[in-house]
Structures are given as C-alpha cells and as structure tokens.
Image: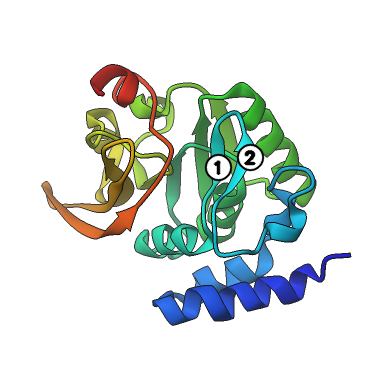
C-alpha cells in the first residue's frame, strides 16, 4: 500500500522547494493532488519520483518539478480561465482546477482524453472541460484565456494561441527542436508581448496544424 500522502509531502519538500518553487498555492496543490492516480497501471510506486513517466500512446506525465515550474510561472490567483494544450494524463489539468476558476483542456489522442476525463471525474475535479482536437489552433469558442499552458514542445509559438491569450495574460510554452526546448514565458500587456526564457526542458513534440505537423 502506497503512503501517498507522505510521498507527496516528500516530493514537495525534496524536489520542489529546494529548486525554487515558492508559490504557496502551487505547493499546496502539489501536496493535495494524487499523482499516482494519473500514471499508468503498475507504475503507481514510481509516481512521485523525480522524473517523467510514460502514460501510453507515446506520451508522458511530466517530471513533478517541471509541472510545478510551469504552473508557478502562470502566477494563478484563482479567478482565471486557463487553456491547457495537451491534457495527457490529466495531472497538470487537476492541479490547474485547484488554482484557477475554469480549465479548458485539449488533447489530440482520444484514448488519453477519455482516460483523463474519467480520472478527473472520479476525483471530483469538475471545473474543467476536455476536448479532443488540435491544440495548436486553440479553442476559439471560449477565448480569450487569462492563461495558456502548453505541455508539448513547439517549433514556434502558435499564432492562434497568441491571439487567444487575453491582454493582460501569460502563456507558458516549450519552444525548440524535437530533442530539446526552452521554456518560454509569454506576457501580453497593454498591446505589447514580452517573451523570456525560463530554462531548458524536454517535452514530446507538439503535433498539429501550427505545430510539428504543419511547421516542423
């Protein structure tokens, strides 16, 4: 039997806080959300380790630190509408539901989207809509979004996502080649867009019309 409460606390105390994750709301959410419910069958014992894990369909659940870093960079206060590109396991989605008002999440792989929705429903995370589709073109029906988070590596920042980001707004997106990316933090304010680097990372490729299928 996994003592998942203790493992979550150790994950926060040993992997996140020493690396500069300081947002108390992010740390509290990481202590609360049961990461082991989002990993593949038989991998529960590895769920809180300092690494990414495969979730099937060629996709992964990101390393806890990278999840926390991207979430912290969004500077969520609780009243935001967030667009997530790449539902994946649903773990990042679950954290966002604890930190924002509403989450809109897009996943291109139907099997992953349905599995994530089932887990989110079972855990009672209800302030989220999951859609199967091409995340690179966003979700225009509900734009603009106060925050956008992209959990796959893009060749460039998709123009559709920039257009759907509110002003003011923040986007976190890995940009680079298919082997290595730089986490870009995009801030839109008063009609101006500022982009800064927040460190190197490795994500699976962002596929779609404005991702690797279209541009790579």
Mark before the other along the chain sequence, 1 or 2: 2
Q: Position of residue 148 (x, y in %)?
A: 37, 45
Please state, as top left, top right, bottom left or bottom right, where the N terminus lies in the image.
bottom right
| Residue 109, image quadrant | top right
In this view of the protein, which residue sits in the foreground, 67 or 203? 203
Residue in view at x 35 percent, y 39 percent: 153
- Which residue bears the numbered disc 2? 55
Is residue 77 placed above or below 86 in the rendered structure? below
Is residue 115 placed above or below 99 in the rendered structure? above
Q: Position of residue 139 (x, y in %)?
A: 41, 28
- Which residue bears the numbered disc 1? 60
Which structural element holds mark 2?
strand
In this view of the protein, which residue sits in the foreground, 161 or 39? 39
83 left or right of 195 in image: right
In this view of the protein, which residue sits in the foreground, 164 or 6? 6
Which structural element holds mark 1?
strand
213 left or right of 83 in image: left
> What colouring does the structure picture have?
rainbow
Tell whether label 2 touches label 1 (CB within 8 Å).
Answer: yes
3 left or right of 20 in image: right
Residue in view at x 33 percent, y 40 percent: 179
Q: Position of residue 74 (x, y in %)?
A: 37, 59
Is residue 15 placed above or below 215 in the rendered structure? below
Q: Position of residue 76 (x, y in %)?
A: 42, 62
């Amino acid at each position: 039997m996994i003592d998942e409460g203790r493992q979550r606390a150790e994950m926060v105390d040993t992997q996140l806080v020493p690396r500069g994750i300081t947002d108390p709301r992010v740390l509290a959410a990481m202590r609360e959300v049961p990461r082991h419910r989002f990993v593949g069958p038989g991998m529960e014992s590895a769920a809180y380790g300092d690494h990414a894990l495969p979730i099937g369909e060629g996709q992964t659940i990101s390393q806890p630190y990278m999840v926390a870093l991207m979430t912290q960079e969004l500077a969520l206060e609780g009243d935001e509408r967030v667009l997530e590109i790449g539902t994946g396991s649903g773990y990042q989605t679950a954290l966002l539901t604890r930190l924002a008002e509403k989450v809109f999440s897009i996943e291109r792989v139907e099997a992953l989207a349905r599995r994530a929705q089932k887990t989110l429903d079972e855990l009672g995370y209800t302030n989220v809509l999951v859609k199967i589709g091409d995340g690179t073109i966003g979700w225009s029906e509900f734009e603009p979004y106060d925050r956008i988070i992209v959990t796959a590596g893009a060749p460039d920042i998709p123009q559709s996502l920039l257009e759907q980001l509110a002003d003011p707004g923040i986007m976190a997106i890995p940009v680079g080649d298919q082997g290595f990316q730089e986490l870009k933090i995009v801030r839109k304010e008063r009609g101006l867009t500022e982009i800064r680097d927040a460190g190197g990372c490795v994500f699976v490729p962002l596929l779609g019309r404005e991702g690797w299928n279209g541009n790579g």
